[in-house]
Amino acid sequence: MTDLERRYLRLLRAYPADYRRLRGAEIVGTYLALAGPDRRWPSPADTADLVRGGLRQRLRASGAAGLVPGVRLAAVLAFLTASALAAAWTVLELRPPAPEFGLPTAGPFDTIAMVAWVAWLAAAVGHTLAPWRYARPVLWLAVLLTALVLPVSALTGLPRPPLLVLAPQLALGVVALGMPERPPLAARIALLPGGALAGALAARWLADDHLFADYRSFGAIATSLAAGTVLLIAILVLAVDLTRRGDFRGGWALLFLTTPLGLLSLRELTEGAAGRNPDWATLSATTLTVSVAGPALLMLAVAVSTRMTQLRSAPPCPNCGSPR
């Protein structure tokens, strides 16, 4: 056995044991036949393909076959929401506070997050007009820049948006990374008009010159709440419609979007726990709770689905013939 074959066999552990026994030799043989004569390690593409295939088979064996389509559906909805929010925040960034307020700014913009919002808008344009191989890296860049806003602000002392804005945007971005290679045509068509509408609404809220508006203003709060409401209604309608046809990906998508939906409602949740003006400790604790609750619910759903599949596939009792 060569080193390359041994390494492919290690990667094959991503598949369930029964599947490995039935088709493991065939799968490894195919990869070895396609590998170059001088190759000693599996290529990154082969590694990703094997791990992805193994996870898909494990989900299918657990009865959660709709999870992968659910991820893709959730990713499309998350990307639409994040792009629309980025358009609204871009309008707000272009209106920094007047000098008489004495508040810090990031040059001509309100905060350093303007770089992240521009990346999100570029990702929206890319997924609408550009090929996937060019649009995908821009989406990763947008998510990375959103994650870096908080540490960069802490290191440089430059202003940043509050956690109420950054946390849901980052959560939506992480879910959006599950976008399929070819997003639905309706989603691609809706990206630019949706962003333009969000930007127009934000501009309308900020149009009054003698109204000082920032990320904590009524308009900004209403933007996050409206985005969460529209996202929740959309996923509920899709879930009910798909479930009526025996397709449960809408339910899985709702589980994946639980954390972004909770973070979009973070202000309402913290106000309910600590009154009108929650402190940093309460805000952080609520954010952590919401961030943990979503993955916990998803893991519970997978465990329940696995258990139900095992019960359905168990042989009947040999004495009475009833299911065990």
Image (tube, rainbow, N blue to C red):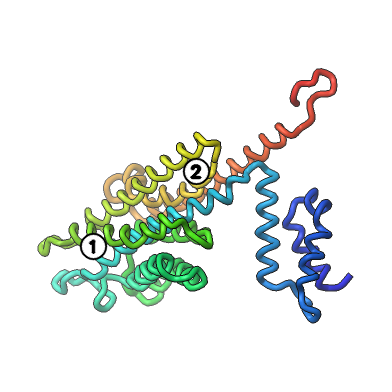
Above or below residue 211? Residue 256 is above
- Which one is earlier in the sequence, the residue at label 2 or at label 1? 1
Q: Is residue 268 left or right of residue 135?
A: left
* Residue at figure coordinates x 16%, y 71% from the top left: 98
Residue 89 occupies which quadrant of the picture? bottom left
* Front in this rendered view, residue 303 or 285: 303
Residue farthest toward the left in the current orientation of the protein: 210
Residue 247 at x, y percent in the picture: 54, 40
Quadrant in which the C terminus appears: top right
Q: Which residue type carries mark 1?
A: Asp
The count of marks equals 2
Q: Is residue 153 left or right of residue 176?
A: left
Q: Is residue 122 visible?
A: yes
Residue 163 occupies which quadrant of the picture? bottom left
The 10 Å Cα crowd at callout 2, few under 14, some 14 to 19, many 20 or more, is many
Instruction: Name the residue tied to disc 1.
Output: 214
* Residue at figure coordinates x 50%, y 47% from the top left: 253
Instruction: Measure how far apart labels 2 and 1 are at the Cα level.
Output: 35 Å
Above or below residue 267? Residue 52 is below
Quadrant in which the N terminus appears: bottom right
Instruction: Name the residue tied to disc 2.
Output: 250
Residue 91 at x, y percent in the picture: 25, 66
Residue 53 at x, y percent in the picture: 68, 57
* Residue at figure coordinates x 81%, y 57% from the top left: 24
Q: Is residue 167 visible?
A: no
Q: Which residue type carries mark 2?
A: Gly
Above or below residue 226? Residue 109 is below
Above or below residue 152? Residue 257 is above
The 10 Å Cα crowd at callout 1, few under 14, some 14 to 19, many 20 or more, is some
Q: Which mark is residue 1?
A: none
